Each structure stands twice: as C-alpha cells, then as structure tokens.
Amino acid sequence: MILIKNVRGKVRSCRRDNDEFFLFFHRLQIYMVCYTIFMEKNTLRKIKQWILGSIAVVGAVLGVLTLTGTHESLRKFLAGLLIVLSVLFGLTGLVDSEEAKPVSDNLYFVDEVIDGDTIGINGNMKIRLIGIDAPESDECYYEESRDELIRLVQEKYVRLEKDVDSVDGLGRLLRYVYLPGEDLEEDDIFVNEHLLRQGYAQTLSHAPNNRYKMLFVKAREEALIQRRGLWSDECDYLEEFEEENELTREINELPSDPNCLIKGNISSRGAGKLYFPPGCSSYNQIKIDPSKGEQYFCTEEEAIAAGFKKSGNCP
C-alpha cells in the first residue's frame, strides 16, 4: 500500500487536469521516438531493459488494484502508463532490430572500420577485403587509408560477395565489399577496387580468390602511374615497388592515357609483337621502349589491329 500511495502522490503532483496529463505523455512519446532513432545500440538496449522492468511493475500494481476494485482514478492512470510503456518498448525493439539485421539477404551494417582493409559488422564479425593490402598502423599512409574506408562505409549498409575461400587464417571472412548507390541511377562503389585505384592500398594475392585479379592490377597500375595516395613522394612504397619489380625504366615511360595500360612489346627473342593486359603473370616485368615501336594500348582490339597478338602467359 505504501507503493500505491507514493504513486498516487506523484500523479497528483504532475497532473492538474486530464488535458495536461495526456499532453505530458504525448510529448514524452514523441521525445522517446526521436531519442531511439539517434542513440547508440548499447544505450538503446539498457533503455529497453528499463522499460520492460517498468512494464512489469506497473502491470503488477494495476493487477492488484483491479482485484481489489479500488482507486479507480489511479487504475486509469496506470492503464494509460502501461500503454505508453508498451508502445515505447515496441519502438525501441524496432530500431534495435533494424540495426542488428541485414536490410536484405546480402546487405550488412558496418559497425566499425578496423583499418584500411578490414571492417566489422554485426558487432563481432570481421571482414577482410579480398585482393588489397592497406598500410598497417606503424606504416606510412595508415591514417589516410583508414579514414577513406571510414568515409566510404562507416555506419552504412554494404553488400558482400565471397570468392572461393570464405575465411582467412585469422578467422576473418574474406569478401568483396560494395557500397550500394543512393538511387537507381547511381552505380554501386566496388570498395576493394576504389581503394586500389585511389592509392589507398596495394594489391595482395589471396589465391585461389582471384576473380577480379586483372581489374585490381589495372586499378593499382593507374594509381601508381598517377602517383596517387601511397604511391606519392610522401611514402617510400614506389621506390620499394620499383626495386622489387625492376620497373624504374618502365615507370619513366608513362602512358599518355592512364586508362590505356595494355603493353605492346616487341620480343628480342623471336616471339614477335606481343601484347600484355594487366593481370598477365609477367606484366610487371615487361618494359615499353617507344624507340623500338613498343607502345601502350587502350583495348585489346587496338593491339590486334596494330599487329600484336596476346601473350601465351596471359589469362
């Protein structure tokens, strides 16, 4: 009975008439709807637990009053309060479920960007982007690479695509990541390729996951030629790359168009005129010497028309 008296006292103190009473709860409901939209998930779950506990207490008190048949005005108030709490609990549950589950079978909410090539979804699931290798935390261009991935996908829904292998040695899911366009006229962003093309990552072979190997090599070559991102003078990656692949001379002979990366090479060993699209196993070792009639082509059709044939070590 002490609890009932306290409740009645609070009701009388905040309620001068029925109009003010219902106006108060109407404003409370609007406030809670707005708040649940913007609050963090952990806070949202705590609010849900508090509301559920309040529903249990109010329901118990209302049940006792109903059985005794007393305090009619208080029972009406508690009945209204129970309805409001139930509605708020349903709203918080709806917001929470929309954030935790994919919008469709292959769209997932990105909770966290761990570094320039790894993201987190659904709280504890890590996704490693296939085919790229972004700088580590102690390496040049780490912050820029991570910030770009944050800008692209943080707290957004992405589509995931697997290749042959599903999980790496660290238990992370291996996936290609796409950011859906905002409308039907806007193309999706292939995140893996974007990071390579803009110079935020290098290529990294994840055999047998080589579905987009040629596309990734071409994107990397474009960034390298244009000195974008980590290939700029800000870092030493270009120098290291040249030493590893013996590309110093080739890089000095830049194609006139960064989209024209097919190499037309004239063999000095009698193989004749061969062309090498990005993705060929010996692509990085092929040098272009314009003085010998060698050149870059934009399409394979152009190379064939110029009398070149595709190298046998190209897919």
Image (cartoon, grey):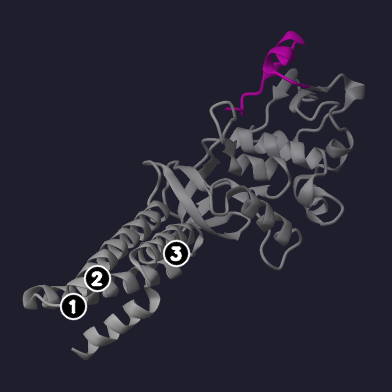
Describe the element under mark 2 as helix, strand or loop: helix
Please name the residue that numbered disc 3 is placed on: 41
* Residue at position x 26%, y 69% in the image: 77
Q: Depth check: 166 or 176 in front?
A: 176
Q: Amino acid at mark 1?
A: Val
Q: Amino acid at mark 3?
A: Lys
Please name the residue that numbered disc 1 is placed on: 61
Describe the element under mark 3 as helix, strand or loop: helix
Q: Is residue 309 magenta?
A: yes
Instruction: Give residue 208's position: percent from left, percent from top.
Output: 48, 43
Q: Depth check: 78 or 209 in front?
A: 78
Q: Depth check: 167 or 155 in front?
A: 155
| Above or below for 136 versus 71 | above
> What is the crowding at mark 3: few (fewer than 14 residues within 10 Å), some, or many (at least 20)?
some
* Residue at position x 25%, y 66% in the image: 82
Numbered disc in front, either 3 or 1:
1
Marked residue nearer the N-terminal end (1 or 2): 1
> What is the crowding at mark 2: few (fewer than 14 residues within 10 Å), some, or many (at least 20)?
many
